[in-house]
Image: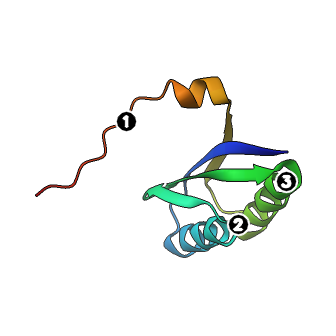
Amino acid sequence: MRARLLLIYDIPDDGIRTKVADACLDYGLDRIQYSAFLGQLSTTHQEELMLKVQKKLGDRSGKVSLIPICERDWSARLEIDQDAG
């Protein structure tokens, strides 16, 4: 079963931050802001991704959160998405 997820991070090291972003993209997540990704992953892929992120982070400082979003909460979201014309 695939769950809708929000992955956000705060990683001071530019190189590590880029590697984490690349891993998110490799797993098919969509970048919605500079340090935020959204997508759907199975439980196995969630665990794999977080293990890869932990490995890339190593002993350096950083915080990464993978947050599941249920369908009810997703349906209740409010969003503004506009292009400046």
| Picture quarter with the C terminus | bottom left
Name the amino acid, label 2: Tyr
Question: Residue, x 54% and y 28% (percent of image)?
Answer: 75
Towards the viewer: 85 or 27: 85
Residue corresponding to mark 2: 27
User: Of circles 1 and 3, which is in front?
Assistant: 1
Tag 3 secondary structure? helix
Residue corresponding to mark 1: 79
Measuring from the top left, give residue 47's x and y in whole percent.
85, 53
Label 1 and label 2: CA atoms lie apart by: 24 Å
80 relative to 11 in the view: left or right = left
Name the amino acid, label 1: Glu
Residue 52, above or below 44: below
Q: Which of marks 3 and 2 is nearer the N terminus?
A: 2
Q: Tell me how many marks there are.
A: 3
Query: Dots 1 and 3: beta carbons under 8 Å?
Result: no
Towards the viewer: 22 or 11: 22
Label 3 and label 2: CA atoms lie apart by: 11 Å
| Residue count near mark 2 (Cα–Cα under 10 Å), binned few <14, some 14–19, many ≥20 | some
Measuring from the top left, give residue 59's x and y in whole percent.
73, 63
Residue corresponding to mark 3: 47
Tag 2 secondary structure? loop
Label 1 and label 3: CA atoms lie apart by: 28 Å
The answer to which image quadrant residue 50 occupies is bottom right
* Colour scheme of the rendered structure: rainbow
12 relative to 81 in the view: left or right = right
Name the amino acid, label 3: Glu
18 relative to 84 in the view: left or right = right
Question: Residue, x 21% and y 55% (percent of image)?
Answer: 83
Measuring from the top left, give residue 69's x and y in whole percent.
65, 34
Towards the viewer: 9 or 40: 40
